[in-house]
Amino acid sequence: MKRLYYELIESLRIAFAQIWANKLRSALTALGVIIGIVAVSLMGTAIKGIDAGVDRSMAGFGDDVLYVTKWPWSNVDDWWNYRNRRSIRYDYARQINEWIAANPDTSLKLAVPAAERFTTIIRGEYRLSNIYTLGTTADYARITRSDMKEGRFFTDVEGQAGANVCFIGFDVADALFPNESPLGKTIRIKDQLFNVIGVAAKQGSFLGLFSWDSMVAMPLTTYRRYFRVGEDCEIRVQVDVLRIDQAREELQGLIRRLRMLGPEQKDDFNINEQGTIRAQLDPIKNSLFFAGMAITALALFVGAIGIMNITYVSVKERTKEIGIRKALGARRRTILLQFLIEAVTICFIGGAIGILSTAALKSLVELIAPSFPLVNSLGLVLLGLGLSVLTGVLSGFLPALSASKLDPVVALRYE
């Protein structure tokens, strides 16, 4: 064991000496490995970034909320069929909550009605267009995952009275009230003045998904009075996340009874959840993954061929040295370790440079596009270094084995 330890130390010393003596050749040899490790690291940070961005953007949806809507959250192939469906009525939320109160063992927790549209918001000389405007009840604050920056959400009393109060997103507050607090100040919506009573904390958005940053919420009674909408809305139902499948079936049966659908009739509504959006994003992540793996595999393959070639060249150049070492008693294992460790060392250095290059590129992307999330992790670093070592072992083994099998007499006569 002690002999093996000294052989490893000596092999490392020789490897670094050879790399230093042939710096340019070693750098060019490691280039394929560097590109491969950068590719796999960027792919990993991008995929983790997509997951983090989706989680951040969907915080307002909640993973424990089901959405009863007229339309599905996916592409539809029969537009007129969905268009002619009956409206989802506001009163469903009240009836669902009454049923929840009468059935304490239910997996449903709370139903909240919500109506939405995009509108223009004005404050003095500032004007914001296409702002997501939500009409809902005070219970909405209980099912959303958004944090509060300052102020509060509106109360049941304000909701029932149809008060002209509103809760605004971070970006809306920043655009309409730069360098000042919006609390207690007014904004204009539909030619009506609304008092700002609260501001949401910054959430951020990703891939155009919903974000509380660019939204305004007001009492549903107020919303219906000024926007003059009918009964059409959506019902957001908070459920027990540990029994979400049961909750979906329970909610489906309850809505069918409220809409008086017969056993032979199909659902004329949809129950959506944030998983629907995640499923639509899976092809993006899969495409990114396979593209990254293809680039990584190609780069590492080219790098491995280059390292194998250079290792064979190194064996030829040092054939006489190998003969002398064998004549002095060096074992085959010692010679094999010498050249194998040299190949692994080049790959490991290339992998380390690739990891550092990825960190630099990540910082550059964050500087140019700060809204695009990139998430690095220790696991990706270890994966990159592990792949580089594996490449070195696979590409260096055959040349090292051929070096260890050289006949010392023949090697000494090699010119």
Image (spheres, helix red, strand yellow):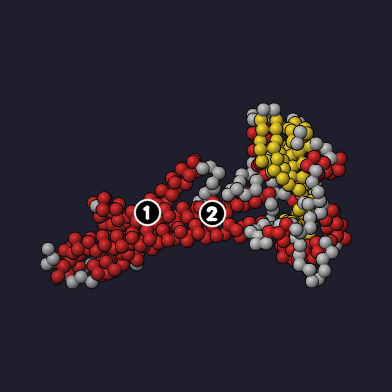
Q: Name the residue under label 2.
A: 48
In the depicted view, which residue is nearer to us: 351 or 409?
351
In the depicted view, which residue is nearer to us: 116 or 200?
116
384 sits to left or right of 79: left
Q: Quadrant of the N terminus?
A: bottom left
The residue depicted at 77 percent of the width and 54 percent of the height is 235
Q: What residue type is labelled 2?
A: Lys
Q: Which of marks 1 and 2 is nearer the N terminus?
A: 1
* Residue 305 picture location, percent across and down: 31, 62
Q: Quadrant of residue 333?
A: bottom left
| Local SS, label 2 | helix
| Local SS, label 1 | helix
348 sits to left or right of 199: left
Q: Mark 1 points at which residue?
A: 34
Q: In which quarter of the image is the C terminus?
A: bottom left
In the depicted view, which residue is nearer to us: 56 or 115?
115
- In the rendered picture of this protein, how many numbered marks are placed on residues? 2
The residue depicted at 17 percent of the width and 70 percent of the height is 408
* Residue 216 picture location, percent across and down: 72, 41
Report the Cα–Cα distance between label 1 and label 2: 21 Å
Disc 2 residue crowd, few under 14, some 14–19, many 20+, Cα 10 Å: some
Residue 34 visible in the snapshot: yes
Disc 1 residue crowd, few under 14, some 14–19, many 20+, Cα 10 Å: many
Q: Which amino acid does label 1 sit on?
A: Ile
* Residue 290 picture location, percent across and down: 47, 61
The residue depicted at 66 percent of the width and 38 percent of the height is 129
